[in-house]
Image: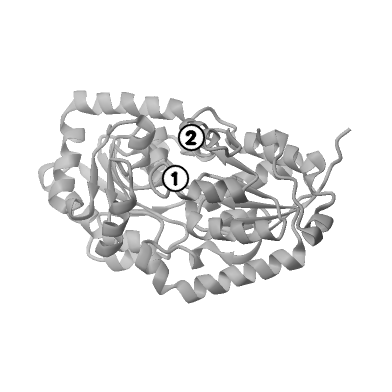
């Protein structure tokens, strides 16, 4: 009979999407094992599920190489603090969620101390940083991946990996009908809506929202029935949006109804990242935008090995929606990329069919539950019952059959 462990779990997420996935995972774990204790780095959603926060994700959201360098003293402080807490609280398991720049380094040091590590939401080594796979193989007991092609890639490299499906399937929910959504904001049923999703980091919003607004103004000059709505990130203050939208009182701002806006807008402008997959789940045509500091982008392009930058196109295996990157993310080019979705019905319909195929590739609902089941199997195999002895001797038993 397997031993059961209640357990203490350290979790580290560094971004808004990681906070969402971490919160869903925590809810699934607590449902199966109410006695678990969670502490680490997360956001409001993880905290609401019971995480004892050491740091909040809003303190960790840096975009680009040089932004990270500028904040390096703070990052080093966080790193040291988390390792001190690791030694003090001796968690039975460390769960790392995405955020590879910090988490892979943390995993390396935690492994040296004998702690067990599960990585949830894979670093995008298929895009860049393939050299990281050796570190993952050496320092992670199991990786729970959210794209089917990732399981194949990792297993070929000797890393125990399990495809659990995409957790966005669990959390995507418009919450209201289209009629109620439009009525709430005083928008008529015949009005066409341009959804603006400029990202979850300060730098993203500052770089993308102004060009999104300028593109909207040009589109509206030709299509007077077009309205714009901005999906504000929960992790960012209202003042950030107010400063940039002060002269645009016709643009509706909303918070906590991002999925409804994705579902009910006619076309979306979306910052590259997880939001492109959420918009694909909604079946809404989109234009993917990406801007970062010029030197950071130049270095990044030297490292990236794939032609597309938007996750929706990567999962599709080809470009099914337009991508506008850096200087191409200009009001004029955005205008020309968006307009066909509003004027060419056949083009719009073809794109929606392609987005449906992407949605199907992401698997069914229940990813968080499947991930939680793997994690609890890992705990229940008794790997941690002698953890303190292992930490003292430095001996570790490397792999779990639940992740093989």
Residue under numbered circle 2: 153
Image position, residue 245 (x, y; %): 27, 62
Q: How crowded is mark 2: few (under 14 residues within 10 Å), some or many (20 or more)?
A: some
Q: Could you give the CA–CA distance between mark 1 and mark 2, rounded to whole angstroms?
A: 9 Å
Numbered label tally? 2
Q: Residue at coordinates 64% horizontally, 34% vertically from top-left?
A: 370
Image position, residue 13 (x, y; %): 55, 56
Quick one: 269 or 303, which is closer to the camera? 303
Quick one: 300 or 195, which is closer to the camera? 300
Tags 1 and 2 touching, CB below 8 Å = yes
Q: Which numbered marker is on residue 263?
A: none
Quadrant where the image shows the N terminus:
top right
- Residue extending farthest to the right is 1
Q: Is mark 1 on a helix, strand or loop?
A: loop
- Residue extending farthest to the left is 222
Q: On the rendered structure, is 94 left or right of 186?
A: right
Q: In which quarter of the image is residue 41?
A: bottom right
Quick one: 285 or 401, which is closer to the camera? 401
Residue under numbered circle 1: 125
The tag earlier along the polypeptide, 1 or 2, is 1
Image position, residue 267 (x, y; %): 27, 38
Q: Residue at coordinates 80% horizontally, 54% vertically from top-left?
A: 387
Image position, residue 115 (x, y; %): 71, 55
Residue 82 visible in the picture = yes
Q: Residue at coordinates 79% horizontally, 39% vertically from top-left?
A: 381
């Amino acid at each position: 009979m397997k031993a059961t462990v209640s357990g203490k779990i350290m979790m580290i997420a560094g971004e808004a999407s990681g906070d969402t996935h971490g919160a869903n995972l925590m809810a699934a774990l607590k449902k199966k094992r109410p006695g678990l204790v969670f502490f680490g780095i997360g956001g409001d959603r993880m905290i609401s599920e019971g995480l004892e926060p050491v740091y909040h994700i809003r303190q960790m959201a840096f975009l680009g190489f040089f932004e990270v360098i500028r904040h390096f003293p703070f990052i080093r402080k966080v790193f040291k603090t988390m390792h001190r807490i690791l030694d003090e609280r001796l968690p039975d398991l460390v769960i790392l969620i995405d955020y590879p720049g910090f988490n892979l380094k943390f995993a390396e040091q935690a492994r040296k101390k004998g702690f067990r590590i599960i990585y949830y939401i894979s670093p995008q080594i298929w895009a860049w940083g393939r050299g990281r796979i050796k570190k993952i193989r050496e320092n992670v007991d199991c990786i729970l991946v959210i794209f089917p092609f990732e399981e194949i890639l990792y297993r070929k490299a000797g890393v125990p990996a399990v495809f659990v499906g995409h957790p966005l399937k669990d959390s995507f929910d418009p919450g209201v009908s289209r009629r109620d959504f439009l009525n709430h904001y005083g928008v008529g049923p015949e009005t066409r809506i341009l959804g603006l999703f400029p990202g979850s980091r300060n730098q993203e919003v500052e770089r993308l929202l102004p060009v999104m607004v300028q593109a909207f103004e040009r589109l509206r000059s030709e299509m007077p029935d077009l309205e714009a709505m901005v999906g504000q990130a929960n992790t960012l203050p209202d003042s950030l949006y107010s400063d940039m939208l002060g002269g645009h009182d016709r643009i509706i701002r909303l918070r906590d109804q991002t999925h409804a806006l994705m579902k009910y807008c006619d076309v979306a402008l979306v910052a590259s990242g997880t939001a492109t997959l959420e918009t694909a789940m909604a079946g809404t045509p989109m234009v993917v935008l990406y801007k970062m500091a010029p030197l950071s982008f130049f270095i990044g392009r030297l490292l990236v090995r794939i032609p597309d930058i938007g996750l929706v196109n990567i999962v599709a295996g080809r470009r099914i929606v337009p991508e506008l990157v850096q200087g191409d993310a200009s009001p004029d080019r955005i205008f020309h990329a968006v307009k066909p979705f509003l004027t060419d019905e056949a083009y719009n319909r073809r794109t929606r069919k392609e987005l449906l195929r992407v949605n199907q590739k992401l698997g069914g609902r229940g990813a968080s539950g499947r991930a939680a089941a793997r994690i609890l199997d890992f705990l229940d195999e008794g790997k941690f019952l002698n953890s303190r002895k292992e930490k003292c001797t430095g001996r570790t038993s490397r792999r779990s059959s639940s992740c093989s």
